[in-house]
């Protein structure tokens, strides 16, 4: 289970558009720093700074080749971050489904219901 | 026509912000009411089985304050939020601060208030709500999201579990 600290590092890493673009490039395949820098029109030291942030978050690791030191994208941290956001989203969606039911009731579309109860559609609503 | 709405979307615009977007098939004025009138707000915000909202005070004007409190039916655990309204432009914009009151539930969202901007836009009978919440730090933002999801998660999945078979059975289309 991803710790709070790890999530902080992941979200910080993802909060920069250049770093997100680096991840998109690495998603196509592992690359050396030199090969990474060219399309960004950035110096290698500048790219390396971004890579350090990504590595600290576990999003990027360094491959075996001692000379090329290719950077590769690790999928687990991104998946953990996505799942984490999804749970928060599901919490809000639960609230909004209650709001949908209330708004329908206020517009005379649906019979009233107890707060927190799942509203059931007994009638066939058909086209409105 | 299905009453199923487009599901909520969550984005992280910066390391200390969350943005929640959702559309509703209702006029903007009605959605504004649902967000600002206590008797309506308590019908949906945190309205989950096993919890009530005994405190819902809203003085919706610039400089006015609000206070929300929830209580569990079993054990009487309490928590809530309070804050101040900074900008009120009915029915399109509401800005306020928000501070978490952990009560006896625990959890934390940091010591500084969050800053919330709610925008409502209406087009073709559909109101789009965009709520941007800005925290004082990245840690506060992540702590707030973690606290929110931990307690709401089980219930919201229950909602979805119950809703999907009903939609399938009634033949409602997406």
Image: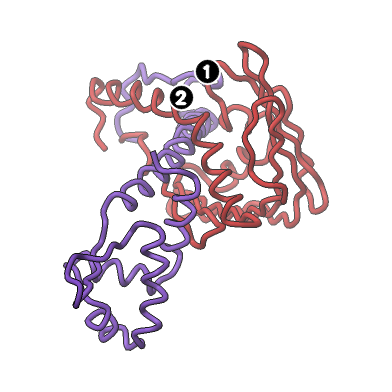
Chain colours: A purple, B red
- The residue labelled by disc 1 is B49
In this view, the residue in front, B87 or A27, is A27
B140, above or below B30, in the image? below
**Number of numbered markers:** 2
Residue A24 in picture, x, y percent from top left: 27, 67
The residue depicted at 35 percent of the width and 67 percent of the height is A20
Please tell me which of labels 2 and 1 falls first in the chain: 1
* Circle 1: element type: loop
The residue depicted at 71 percent of the width and 50 percent of the height is B113
In this view, the residue in front, A81 or A1, is A1
Horizontal side of A69 relative to B49 (left or right) equals left
Residue B168 seen:
yes
Q: Are marks 2 and 1 in contact (CB under 8 Å)?
A: yes
Residue projecting furthest to the right? B63
- In which quadrant is the N terminus of chain B drawn? top left
Residue projecting furthest to the front? A66
B71, above or below A16, in the image? above
Residue B117 in picture, x, y percent from top left: 62, 55
Q: Which mark is residue B59?
A: none
Q: Which mark is residue B155?
A: 2
């Amino acid at each position: 289970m991803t710790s709070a600290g790890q999530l902080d590092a992941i979200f910080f890493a993802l909060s920069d558009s250049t770093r997100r673009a680096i991840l998109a490039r690495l998603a196509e395949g592992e690359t050396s720093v030199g090969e990474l820098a060219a399309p960004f029109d950035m110096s290698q030291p500048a790219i390396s700074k971004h890579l350090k942030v990504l590595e600290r978050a576990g999003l990027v690791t360094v491959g075996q080749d001692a000379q090329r030191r290719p950077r590769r994208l690790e999928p687990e941290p991104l998946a953990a971050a996505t799942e984490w956001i999804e749970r928060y989203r599901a919490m809000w969606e639960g609230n909004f489904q209650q709001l949908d039911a209330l708004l329908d009731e206020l517009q005379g579309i649906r019979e009233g219901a107890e707060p927190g109860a799942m509203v059931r559609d007994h009638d066939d609503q058909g086209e409105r | 026509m299905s009453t199923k709405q487009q599901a909520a979307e969550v984005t992280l615009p910066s390391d200390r912000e969350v943005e929640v977007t959702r559309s509703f098939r209702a006029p903007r004025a009605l959605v504004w009411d649902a967000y600002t009138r206590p008797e309506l707000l308590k019908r949906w915000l945190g309205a989950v089985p096993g919890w009530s909202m005994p405190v819902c005070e809203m003085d919706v004007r610039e400089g006015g304050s609000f206070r929300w409190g929830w209580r569990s039916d079993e054990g009487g655990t309490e928590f809530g939020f309070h804050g101040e309204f900074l900008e009120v432009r009915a029915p399109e914009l509401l800005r306020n601060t928000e501070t978490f009151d952990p009560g006896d539930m625990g959890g934390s969202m940091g010591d500084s208030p969050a800053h919330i901007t709610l925008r409502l836009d209406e087009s073709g009978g559909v109101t789009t709500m965009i709520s941007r919440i800005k925290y004082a730090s990245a840690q506060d933002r992540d702590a707030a999201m973690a606290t929110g999801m931990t307690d709401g998660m089980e219930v919201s999945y229950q909602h979805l579990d119950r809703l999907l078979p009903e939609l399938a059975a009634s033949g409602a289309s997406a």
